[in-house]
Image (cartoon, rainbow, N blue to C red):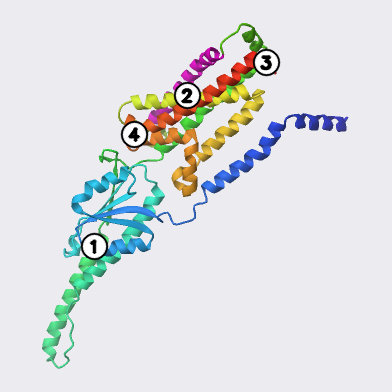
């Protein structure tokens, strides 16, 4: 009896080749993607692009730029009057950071002001911390070298001077040294770098927080799981022979698909609004910063519709292609997890190697997340998210068209799975 039961289970397993394949393929694919996503082993600041803005032909800025180039940071020197142009370069991706040095080499070191750092709001925190460390180290060294070069002090070389005169000179030397050391201590005790986050219009915004990534990321992830209830309905339609009755009634495939889209689209919108409300009102109650939406709500509404359309297109395509509910969950759920891993949902794209960051562009979830970041962090409007809306709409159109074609064929030829 035991052997017969064992043989029966083995036969059932052999019939479900898709399920068996997923058991092996999904973990391998997920392992490879996550390993690549977390394999960034070079220094975060390597190949960074910064603009160093300050007094033209200033020796400190020139020396600082040379020191940073040795750290594989690409520096563009710009005069102070070009500060606005340099800041605009943050948004057209010419620069990742703008460093403004308002201090002249000839000025007193004790009077030095903090260097101003300007970055986009979506700047990755660990990268910024690494670059700031390098900037502070080399600016300190360069500034102190210039200070001591210009303040050599007094040297006593003539031993034949009367002792009283030498003592008087030594006293002045000591006073000069004390003055220099006091100036250096004052310089080192000051805050050397001040950072500012600039929106798309070069307005200063608050420092970004983790909530502005996590809430949109998992909201998009959740919206794509509309595939599960939709696939259940489609599978039930086949199991109850509803598809045969629809075929006999000569129902339009596109009309039936459109009728299915509306209720699930509304569910997606409820998900969207619900998650945003939780981010706004619940998170502060547990000690986490609130999610604040910036600007008009129209771009958010259009983004919600575009993400929902992409999610529904994917869900319908999986649902009409799957032969059972289990098949749909395994195939569709696996695809969603892979899209999330590639698209920066599970691991933020900015911690990935450059190759993996380029790969995120194949994931619809990445398009939605990047659009959210444009709205929340850069405070962009419709013009800032237009390309992402187009990508999501194109994906939705392609998947919905494929789903309609498959479903039409099923209505014409299939009686029952």
Of 212 and 228, nearer the camera is 228
Mark whose residue sits in front, 1 or 2: 2
Tag 1 residue: 187
> Which residues are drawn in magenta?
253-282
For this orientation, the residue located farthest to the right is 1
Tag 3 residue: 414
Tag 2 residue: 309
Of 62 and 27, nearer the camera is 62
* Neighbours of disc 3 within 10 Å: few (<14), some (14-19), many (20+): some
Residue name at image x 42 percent, y 54 percent: 44
Tag 4 residue: 384
Mark whose residue sits in front, 3 or 1: 3
| Disc 3, SS | loop
Magenta segment main secondary structure: helix
* Neighbours of disc 4 within 10 Å: few (<14), some (14-19), many (20+): some
Q: Position of residue 143 (x, y in %)?
A: 25, 65
């Amino acid at each position: 009896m035991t052997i017969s039961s064992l043989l029966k289970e083995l036969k059932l397993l052999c019939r479900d080749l898709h399920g068996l394949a997923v058991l092996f393929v999904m973990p391998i694919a997920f392992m490879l993607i996550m390993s690549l996503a977390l394999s960034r082993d070079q220094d975060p600041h390597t190949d960074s692009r910064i603009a160093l803005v300050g007094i033209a032909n200033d020796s400190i800025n020139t020396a600082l730029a040379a020191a940073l180039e040795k750290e594989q940071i690409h520096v563009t020197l710009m005069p102070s009057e070009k500060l606005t142009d340099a800041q605009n370069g943050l948004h057209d991706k010419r620069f990742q950071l703008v460093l403004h040095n308002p201090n002249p080499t000839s000025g007193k070191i004790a009077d030095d002001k903090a260097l101003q750092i300007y970055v986009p709001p979506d700047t990755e925190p660990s990268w910024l911390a690494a670059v700031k460390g390098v900037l502070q180290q080399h600016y300190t060294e360069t500034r102190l070298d210039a200070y001591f070069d210009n303040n050599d002090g007094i040297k006593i070389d003539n031993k034949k001077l009367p002792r009283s005169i030498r003592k008087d000179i030594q006293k002045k030397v000591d006073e000069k040294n004390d003055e220099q050391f006091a100036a250096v201590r004052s310089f080192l005790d000051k805050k050397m770098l001040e950072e500012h986050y600039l929106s798309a219009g070069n307005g200063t915004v608050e420092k970004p927080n983790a909530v502005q990534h996590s809430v949109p990321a998992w909201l998009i992830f959740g919206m794509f799981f509309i595939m599960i209830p939709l696939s259940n309905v489609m599978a039930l339609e086949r199991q109850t022979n509803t598809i045969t009755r629809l075929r006999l009634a000569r129902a339009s495939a596109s009309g039936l698909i459109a009728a299915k889209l509306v209720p699930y689209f509304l569910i997606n919108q409820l998900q969207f609004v619900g998650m945003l409300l939780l981010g706004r009102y619940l998170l502060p109650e547990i000690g986490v910063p609130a999610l604040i939406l910036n600007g008009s709500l129209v771009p958010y509404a259009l983004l919600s519709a575009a993400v929902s359309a992409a999610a529904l297109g994917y869900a319908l395509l999986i649902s009409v292609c799957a032969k059972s509910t289990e098949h749909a969950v395994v195939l569709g759920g696996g695809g969603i997890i892979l899209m999330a891993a590639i698209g920066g949902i599970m691991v933020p794209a900015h911690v990935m190697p450059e190759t993996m960051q380029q790969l995120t562009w194949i994931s619809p979830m990445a398009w939605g997340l990047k659009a959210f970041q444009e709205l929340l962090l850069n405070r962009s409007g419709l013009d800032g998210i237009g390309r992402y809306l187009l990508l999501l709409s194109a994906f939705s159109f392609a998947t919905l068209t494929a789903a309609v074609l498959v479903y039409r064929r099923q209505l014409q030829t299939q009686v029952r799975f």
